[in-house]
Image: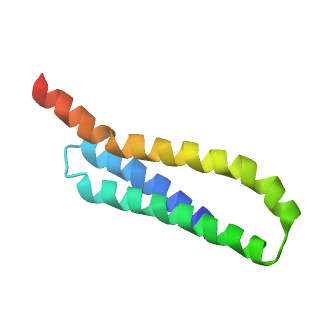
Amino acid sequence: MWMVLGVLAIGATLFNLYTFNVGKDYKLPMALALSLTALTVCADYSHLSVWVEAEDWSALADVIPGMGRALWVLTSISILLNMLPIFLERMRKQA
């Protein structure tokens, strides 16, 4: 499930940047993309909790270190890309 939500979050982010680029209102796609990013993190956490309940410690030891860093990096990139239109719009107004 987290993979599906992640792909949808990427698609919504690209749609957000597209709507800004063509001059349309980008706030709804931005909210959708950030919401899908949050849901992706929650779904991944739920997936990992299943492994904890099953006491599959070797799977957790293999996945958690890399996945933790990946989630931080990808979530940060998502936030920056989705907020980029706000910063660009402010720069246009100042110029």
Q: Using residue 6 as the reference point, say whether residue 68 is left or right of it.
A: right
- Residue 21 in sight from this viewpoint: no
Residue at the image position 11 percent from the left and 30 percent from the top:
93
Please state which of residues 6 and 21 is positioned toward the viewer in this rendering: 6
Please state which of residues 61 and 95 is positioned toward the viewer in this rendering: 61
Residue at the image position 72 percent from the left and 75 percent from the top:
50
Residue at the image position 69 percent from the left and 51 percent from the top:
67
Task: Please determine whether, in this image, residue 93 is positioned above or below residue 12.
Answer: above
Q: In which quarter of the image is the N terminus?
A: bottom right
Residue 2 lies in quadrant: bottom right
Q: x, y percentage for residue 5?
A: 53, 65
Q: Using residue 7 as the reference point, say whether residue 78 is left or right of it.
A: left
**Chosen colour scheme:** rainbow
- Residue 11 in sight from this viewpoint: yes
Residue projecting furthest to the top: 95
Task: Please determine whether, in this image, residue 77 is positioned above or below residue 45.
Answer: above
Residue projecting furthest to the right: 58
Q: Using residue 5 as the reference point, say whether residue 50 is left or right of it.
A: right
Q: Using residue 64 as the reference point, say whether residue 90 is left or right of it.
A: left
Residue at the image position 12 percent from the left and 25 percent from the top:
94
Task: Please determine whether, in this image, residue 87 is positioned above or below residue 19.
Answer: above
Q: x, y percentage for residue 41?
A: 55, 61
Numbered marks: total: 0
Q: In which quarter of the image is the C terminus?
A: top left
Q: x, y percentage for residue 18?
A: 33, 46
